[in-house]
Amino acid sequence: MANTVKEAVSAFRRAPLLTGLSALMVGLALLVLGLFSLAAFNLKLALTAIEERIEVVAYLRDDIRSVDMEAALQTLRSLPGVEEVLYVSKADALQRALTQLPEIAEVASDLEANPFPASLEVRFQPGSRTTEAVESVSAAARELPAVEDVRYGREWVDRLFALRRIGAITAGTLGGAFALVAALIIGTAIRIAVFARRDEISIMQLVGATNGYIRRPFLLEGAITGLLGGLLAVLLTWGTHQAVYNFLFTLDWIPQTWVWAGVGAGVLFGVLASGLAVRKYLREI
């Protein structure tokens, strides 16, 4: 192991420019993947924030009896996937309308009675905000004697879930494509570095070195090159994130697990590319 490390360090010292260029290519390849991850993560957060606002609103009859009101609350709260049910009185509904639409204040002052009905707002648990759950709760609410009408913005909900499905498919497809491109670029960069040292490999074979002994330093070099490239990609992605955050709009940073996964991918690609390049060259000679 000590000899392997020594050989790897010696190789870096002999060709620092080549090593730096290889690490730079790895970093730029992973940067593309990092920027895509940054965009995909923030899109996911945006869709999640919108999903949290999904709710079913059951408008109550004006002549509702207290017993029917309690029955409606208990029924809705017992439905699968329901997180909470909030009662909004007629006065609260009017106050909300005045807050959200100040322009109706003059009209509302001329009304003899409050035209806004009381309602029950049904909110869902995380993981239960699905089209099926929303429609199931909506159907159950319509059957209640206390309920006059039910609304949940069906077209809006359908479009939201369609957008989420499209986003997941797009993220998977583009993410896989970017990962493949990054792997090809990393593999090419490290193969060039191995090819530049073909004379060294030949000399090692002439003095009786086994294929395993020859391969180990290159694998370590590939791992280090991939590590340097991965760290560079993280640094460049962070710089891009800060630039967008400070000068354009708010942008959340990706989770640390994603960061370390990217660095680990750089190391893995480096090891695999080095191993395949050395193996191919050893077969040819």
Image: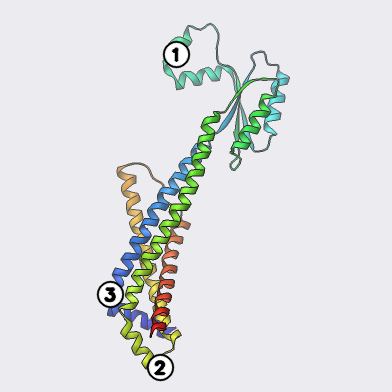
**Which amino acid type is shown beneath numbered disc 3?**
Pro
First-in-chain label (3 vs 1): 3
Residues tagged 1 and 2 counted as in contact (Cβ below 8 A): no
Residues tagged 3 and 1 counted as in contact (Cβ below 8 A): no
Label 1 sits on a secondary structure element that is: helix
Q: In the shown orientation, is residue 163 left or right of residue 118?
A: left
In the picture, the disc for residue 105 is 1
Residue 70 sits in quarter: top right
**Colouring mode (rainbow / by chain / secondary structure / one colour):** rainbow
Callout 2: few (<14), some (14-19), or many (20+) C-alpha neighbours within 10 Å? few
Q: Residue at x 59, y 36 (%)?
A: 131
First-in-chain label (1 vs 2): 1
Q: In the shown orientation, is residue 28 left or right of residue 179?
A: left
Is 160 placed above or below 38 here? above
In the picture, the disc for residue 125 is none
Position of the N terminus by quadrant: bottom left
**Which amino acid type is shown beneath numbered disc 1?**
Ala
Label 2 sits on a secondary structure element that is: loop
In the picture, the disc for residue 16 is 3
Percent from the top left, x then y, of residue 18? 28, 73
Is 92 placed above or below 202 here? above
Percent from the top left, x then y, of residue 61? 64, 16
From the image, state whether disc 2 or disc 3 is nearer to you.
2
First-in-chain label (2 vs 3): 3
